[in-house]
Amino acid sequence: KKHAIVIQSVQALEEELGNLQERARESYTTEKSKDQVLHVLRKEAKAKKQQLIDVEKNLSELDSEKHTLEDLRANILRQSVLEDVEVPLLRGGLEALQDLAEAASQPASGPTQQQHPAAMEVGTAIVVDFGLLPEEKQAASTGPAAKMLEDEYRSEIERLRVELKRLSPNLKAAEQMHGVVEQVQAASHEADVARRDIESIDARFESVRKSRKECFMDCFTKVAAEIGEVYRRLTANTAGLHSDGGSAYLDLEDTEDPFNGGIKFTAMPPAKRFRDMHLLSGGEKTLAAMALLFAVHAYQRPPFMVLDEVDAALDANNVQALAGYVEHASGCQTIVISLKDRFFVRSEALVGVWKNKPQETSAVLTLDLTRYLPNE
């Protein structure tokens, strides 16, 4: 009997345990469902909160834009008072506009740079009458059309401002004109003075240029006329006994303006044909150069002349010819430095420099040769 009671108790407890487990499963399912609903509600609350933040931000921006537009409107109205521009009003009147101008001119008490509160209050009390505008322009209050209309009005205002500035009289024009006339007169006087100076300098330059050409042509004519005879005398008997000598010529490359070109020097040694100067031998070039030197002396003879070993490239016949020409040159003392006896034996005096080895000095010897010349 006790065993049956225990069995019944166990069965009752098992049945109760099953009911509790079922209830636990239902509670878990309900809790999970509620958690999901709570998660969705939190997500929606977060989205609503973000929307609220965005709305507050937009509201703040719109409020700031509103204040900016109010400030701009008040500044435009104040500018109309300062520039005496008549604005049609529905409410407010001229006194309100003057009060707005005075209030806007007072410094703001706050740290920001916004319009003064009094100016804002007066500005909102003023209502502009737009009834005089055409209907299509009254309708264009917002959007791109309003922007285009504003740009159009601004362009027209700027055009009118420029036109007014152009039409406004310049009270200092007469004074400025007088100053400009004085400057023009001073500049004209300076230009006349400079023009006269230029003409005077040009005349002097032309005179100097003409004188230079005359002096050059005078010298060239005499040298060109003399060089042929000088070269013939220098080269006579150098190619053999009783030879007539060579020929030499001077020609201008530009006869109209000699200074624009050069001078062509042509020499033809005895018994030879014409050649360019650079094709002549060393001795032939030396005689041609000496002929040119002596021909220049015919135009302006120097008091004395120094020839420093000009006979270095000459053979015996050419040395004798040069010495003979120098010997008979009149009106000019000639100092010759030479190592060839055929040249210096025909001089009137000798000056020799030699080295005194015992005393390690240079010594000078002189010899008067006029005593040994035959009496004429």
Image: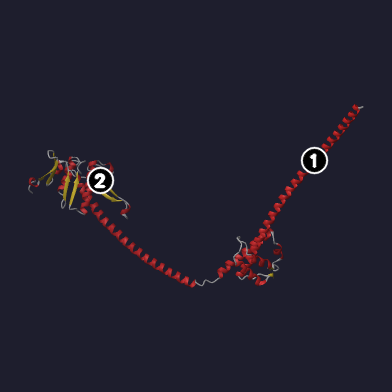
| Disc 2 packing (10 Å; few <14; some 14–19; many ≥20) | many
C-alpha span from label 2 to label 1: 136 Å
Residue drawn at x 82%, y 39% is 27
Depth check, front residue: 289 or 124: 124
The amino acid sitting under disc 2 is Ala
Q: Provide residue 269's location: percent of width, then percent of height.
A: 23, 43
Instruction: Decide: is 233 above or below 75.
Output: above
Residue drawn at x 32%, y 55% is 257
| Secondary structure under the numbered disc 1 in the rendered image | helix
| Disc 1 packing (10 Å; few <14; some 14–19; many ≥20) | few
Q: Which residue is mark 1?
A: 31
Residue drawn at x 70%, y 54% is 56
Depth check, front residue: 148 or 19: 19
Q: Which residue is mark 2?
A: 267
Displayed quadrant of residue 144? bottom right
Mark closer to the chain start, 2 or 1:
1
Q: Nearer the viewer, mark 2 or mark 1?
A: 1
Q: Provide residue 40's location: percent of width, then percent of height.
A: 76, 44
Position of 289 compared to 91: left or right?
A: left
Instruction: Decide: is 320 above or below 217.
Output: above
Displayed quadrant of residue 24? top right
Q: Which labelled disc corresponds to residue 115?
A: none
Depth check, front residue: 228 or 288: 288
Quarter holding the N terminus?
top right
Displayed quadrant of residue 238? top left
Position of 371 compared to 216: left or right?
A: left
The amino acid sitting under disc 1 is Glu
